[in-house]
Image: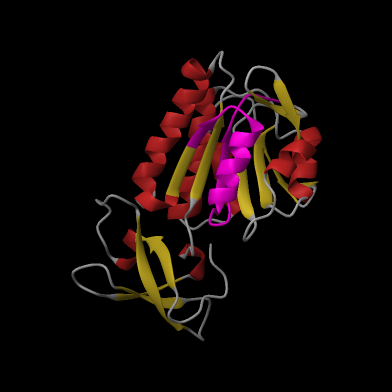
Amino acid sequence: MATKLNVGEVVYVPRSLVGLDWNSQSAFCRVRVNANNRDGPSVTVGTFEEPIPMEKTIHPKFAHRTLRTLIIAIGDYLTEESLIVPLHESLRLFFKLLLPEDELFTHLVHTREELTRHWMIEGTAASHVILIAHGRQDAVLFGHDDWVDSDAFSELLPPLGERKYFVSLACLTGDEQFAKSLSRGKTFHSIVAPDGEIHASSASQFCQTFFSHSYVYGLGAIDAWRKGHESTPGNAKFAFWTRGRRV
């Protein structure tokens, strides 16, 4: 969701909102902001990459300066082929249906150094970060036996560009021991993560629901998180943390 849009700025909006067919490589198209309207929270945007240019008035909440989504899967060597990789692949294919091709980056890493290397290259432009890993209440697992706690994990992802939204699919990382201090840092707006054990299929379902409501239907992070709860089976719930506080 973009704020304080400027006339002439180019942003992404859902194709359906400007009268374009859903049947496209991406659910979004690029438009130019033509006017900030005085009679309410709305902007007039115009398409310029389609055969027939058109103008539409939309709520600013549907506009995104960037959709850059970074998916990081941390392998453990033992279960990654049966669990980490399939979950990673399910989300990679989902986001290929949702986003323009150049807005999605996915990586499988095993070490802290690999994670930081990708972060320094792609972190500045990212708006959302998704973590796939094994977790416990106070740490996430790198490789075979390198458990990294919240403070050490934060050091691997220093602030770059604007604050990002962070969604962890690692079990138990929504617990206070991990999520609270991570949400206090300057890298992320908020942390969404399971506060208990969760099956990989349910984690994938939550993530897809969360981003569908956030990206396509313009819901804010908290409302999209609530929608994700409603459609995710099982007893595990995803916690929402922001600035050291659980919502």
Tell me which colouring the rendered structure shows: secondary structure
Residue 204 location in percent, x, y?
49, 32
> Residue at (50%, 85%) from the top-left corner?
39
Front position in the image: 228 or 243: 243
| 41 within the magenta span | no
Q: Can residue 238 be seen in the rendering of this structure?
A: no
Task: Say if residue 236 shows up in the picture.
Answer: yes
Q: Residue at x 45, y 24 (%)?
A: 86
Provide residue 189's location: percent of width, then percent of height.
67, 54
Residue 218 percent coordinates (x, y) = 49, 58
Q: Is residue 130 magenta?
A: yes
Q: Is residue 141 left or right of residue 43?
A: right
The spot of residue 72 in percent (x, y) is: 54, 37
Question: Which residue is painted at 80% across and 43% down in the image?
Answer: 181
Describe residue 121's horizontal placement relative to residue 148 as left or right.
left
Query: In the rendered view, would you say 9 is above or below 168?
Result: below
Q: Along the horizontal axis of the image, is 51 left or right of 43?
A: left
In the figure, residue 179 lies in which quadrant? top right
What residue span does the magenta drawing correspond to? 107-136
Compared to 240, does 47 lie above or below?
below
Q: Residue furthest top?
A: 78
Residue depicted at x 77% and y 52%: 243
User: Toward the viewer: 152 or 66?
Assistant: 152
* Residue 134, above or below 237: above
